[in-house]
Image (cartoon, rainbow, N blue to C red):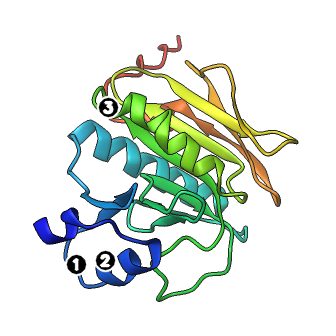
C-alpha cells in the first residue's frame, strides 16, 4: 500500500488497481485512501436508509444501494463510496460503479462532517445525474439537504429536524421519515402514548 500511496494515480489506473484489492479505497486527489470502519450508530443509520428506501422504491426503475458501489468523479478524478445511493440507471450485475446515481447519502461523524459537506459536496455536484445530496447526522436528529437547481448547482436547503426528507426522482417522489432513518438509535423521542 505504501507504494500505491506514493504515486499519483489517474482515475483509470486506480480503477484497474482497485479491482485486485481486498479492501475498498476512495481516490482523493490522485491518492488511494483506505476506507475506515464506522461506529455502530453510523452502520445502523446507513442500514436503516437502505432498507427503508428498498420498500419505498419497489416497483420503480430505481434501487437503493449501500456503500459497496462507487461513484467515479470524472471532473476531479476522485472516487467516492457514499453510505447509500439511489441508482436509477440500468442494472448491470457485474458493475462496481453506480449506473446513474440520483440521490447520494452520507452519514456524518464529528471527524468527517466538514469534509462531507465541502469536499464531497464539490465532487457530487460535478456528477450531473445527482439531483440531491443528503447528509445525515449520527449524533442528533438532523438531516442537511442539497437540491440541484436550474443552473446545475447543488443548493443547500433548510436542515430537517423532524418529519420527513422529501426525495424527488425523475420518475417518482416520496417522503423518507426521520423516524425510520434513526430507528433504533435512541435519538428520536418515543412516540406519544395514546389514551
- Residue labelled with disc 2: 18
Is 11 situated left or right of 74 in this image?
Answer: left
Residue at horizontal 60%, vertical 60%? 75
**Few, some or many C-alpha atoms within 10 Å of disc 3 (few <14, some 14-19, many ≥20)?**
some
Q: Quadrant of residue 55?
A: bottom right
Labelled pair 3, 1 in contact (Cβ < 8 Å): no
Question: Can the viewer see residue 22?
Answer: yes
Residue 74, image x, y percentages = 58, 65
Residue at horizontal 42%, vertical 47%? 48
**Secondary structure state at the residue bearing disc 2:** helix
- Residue labelled with disc 3: 109
Question: Can the viewer see residue 1?
Answer: no
Q: Nearer the viewer, mark 3 or mark 1?
A: 1
**Few, some or many C-alpha atoms within 10 Å of disc 1 (few <14, some 14-19, many ≥20)?**
few
Name the residue nearer the viewer: 75 or 130.
75
Label 2, label 3: how far apart the Cα atoms are = 26 Å
Residue 181, image x, y percentages = 47, 38
- Residue labelled with disc 1: 21
**Few, some or many C-alpha atoms within 10 Å of disc 2 (few <14, some 14-19, many ≥20)?**
some
Farthest residue to the front: give it.
7
Label 2, label 1: how far apart the Cα atoms are = 5 Å
Amino acid at each position: 500500500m505504501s507504494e500505491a500511496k506514493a504515486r499519483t494515480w489517474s482515475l483509470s489506473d486506480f480503477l484497474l488497481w482497485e479491482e485486485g484489492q481486498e479492501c475498498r479505497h476512495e481516490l482523493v486527489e490522485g491518492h488511494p485512501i483506505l476506507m475506515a470502519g464506522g461506529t455502530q450508530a453510523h452502520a445502523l443509520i446507513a442500514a436503516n436508509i437502505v432498507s427503508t428506501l428498498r420498500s419505498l422504491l419497489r416497483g420503480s426503475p430505481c434501487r437503493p444501494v449501500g456503500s459497496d458501489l462507487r461513484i467515479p468523479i470524472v471532473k476531479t478524478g476522485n472516487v467516492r463510496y457514499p453510505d447509500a445511493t439511489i441508482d436509477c440507471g440500468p442494472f448491470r450485475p457485474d458493475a462496481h460503479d453506480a449506473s446513474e446515481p440520483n440521490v447520494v447519502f452520507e452519514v456524518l461523524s464529528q471527524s468527517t462532517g466538514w469534509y462531507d459537506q465541502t469536499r464531497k459536496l464539490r465532487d457530487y455536484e460535478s456528477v450531473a445525474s445527482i439531483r440531491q445530496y443528503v447528509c445525515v447526522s449520527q449524533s442528533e436528529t438532523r438531516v442537511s439537504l442539497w437540491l440541484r437547481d436550474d443552473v446545475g448547482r447543488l443548493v443547500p436547503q433548510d436542515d430537517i429536524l423532524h418529519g420527513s426528507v422529501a426525495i424527488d426522482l425523475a420518475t417518482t417522489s416520496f417522503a423518507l421519515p426521520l423516524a425510520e432513518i434513526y430507528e433504533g438509535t435512541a435519538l428520536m423521542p418515543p412516540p406519544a402514548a395514546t389514551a
